[in-house]
Image: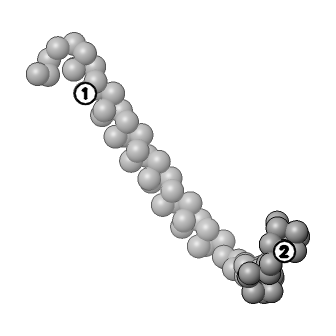
């Protein structure tokens, strides 16, 4: 879509329709070590919680497959 003159010979669009504004690079914010370690601890806790739920669901599935749950 680089050549609008070939695609639209009647120039029914404004000339600026093919132009795009340059994208700005996102500004990076560097975090200090304490913040990163705190975030890592939250992630670890979330993983442990998910593992516990997974184990619990696996046990429920075993009961269900064994016919203990109606």
68 w.r.t. 31: above or below: above
The outermost residue toward the front is: 10
The alpha-carbon separation of the residues under discs 1 and 2 comes to 67 Å
Looking at the image, the residue that sits furthest to the top is 66
Which of 21/39 is in front?
21
Report which quarter residue 70 is drawn in: top left
Image coordinates for residue 17, horizontal then vertical, percent: 75, 82
Q: Vertically, is 43 above or below 65?
A: below
| Residue 20: % across, % down | 78, 81
User: Residue 29: x and y, percent?
Assistant: 69, 80
Estimate the x, y position of residue 23 in percent, counting from the top left: 77, 80
Q: Quadrant of the N terminus?
A: bottom right
- Dot 1: element: helix
Question: Residue 60: which disc?
Answer: 1
Q: Is residue 70 visible?
A: yes
Label 1 Cα crowd, 10 Å radius (few <14 / some 14-19 / many 20+): some
For mark 2, does the 10 Å Cα neighbourhood hold few (<14), some (14 to 19), or many (20 or more) residues?
few
For the residue pair 39 and 6, the one nearer the viewer reads as 6
From the viewer's perspective, tell me whether residue 42 is left or right of residue 29: left
Q: Which of the 4 image quarters holds residue 21?
A: bottom right
Q: Residue at x 61, y 68 (%)?
A: 36
The structure's colour scheme is one colour
Q: Residue at x 51, y 56 (%)?
A: 43
Vertical placement of 35 versus 48: above or below? below
Query: At 31% from the left edge and 32% from the top edge, which residue is drawn?
Result: 57
**Disc 1 vs disc 2: which is toward the camera?**
2
Q: Quadrant of residue 38?
A: bottom right
**Is any atom of residue 24 visible in this view?**
no
**Secondary element at tag 2:** loop
Q: Is residue 17 left or right of residue 56?
A: right
Q: Earlier along the polypeptide chain: callout 1 or callout 2?
A: 2
Image disc number at residue 9 = 2
């Amino acid at each position: 879509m680089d050549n609008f003159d070939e695609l639209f010979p009647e120039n029914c669009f404004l000339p600026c329709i093919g132009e795009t504004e340059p994208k700005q690079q996102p500004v990076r914010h560097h975090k200090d070590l304490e913040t990163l370690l705190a975030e890592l601890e939250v992630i670890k806790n979330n993983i442990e919680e998910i593992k516990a739920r997974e184990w619990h669901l696996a046990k429920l599935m075993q009961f269900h497959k064994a016919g203990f749950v109606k």
